[in-house]
Amino acid sequence: RIKGEERWPTHMGEPRFPSSLLSGPSRRSVQQSVRSRPPVLTMVVVAKRGKASFSSIIDTIAAAPDNVNASNGYYVIKIKEGVYEEYVSVNSSKTNIMM
């Protein structure tokens, strides 16, 4: 274990949590939250170079739909490595965006 980092041991790719954490009803909720993944409505890629949907983060956020309900899925923005020199602000109507 690295000092200052919290790491859980794994068994066959599944996280193993301390038994004290997994007692009673909390066990089910912890296991479900680890296994469940949020639904994805749209996934786009931002890259300064190469093939991507967008080349700037601002344009990507502008293209996101307004008022997305989380149950319908998230608008996921995958940002590839690079230096993005831009000021980004997200309007309150742009909900459920993940970067």
Image (cartoon, grey):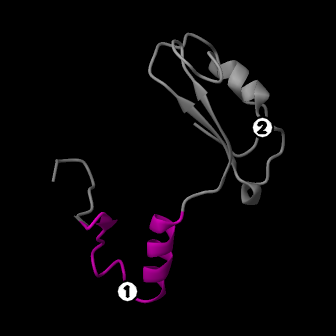
Tell me the kind of residue under disc 2: Lys
The residue sitting at the bottom extreme is: 24
Query: Magenta segment range?
Result: 11-36
Which residue lies at the image location 30% right of the left edge and 72% below the top edge? 17
Image vertical order of residue 51 relative to residue 29, above or below: above
Above or below: residue 37 compared with residue 88 = below
Element type at mark 1: loop
Q: Give the class, few, some or many, for how many residues have Cα within 10 Å of label 2's Cα (few <14, many ≥20).
A: some
Mark 1 — residue?
Answer: 23
The picture quadrant where one finds residue 99 is: top right
Q: Where is residue 89 drawn, in percent x and y? A: 70, 24
Marker disc for residue 79? none
Which corner quadrant of the image does residue 63 belong to?
top right
Whole-percent x, y for residue 76 in the image: 63, 40
**Which residue in the protein does label 2 denote?**
94
Q: Quadrant of the N terminus?
A: bottom left
Q: What secondary structure is marked by label 2?
A: loop
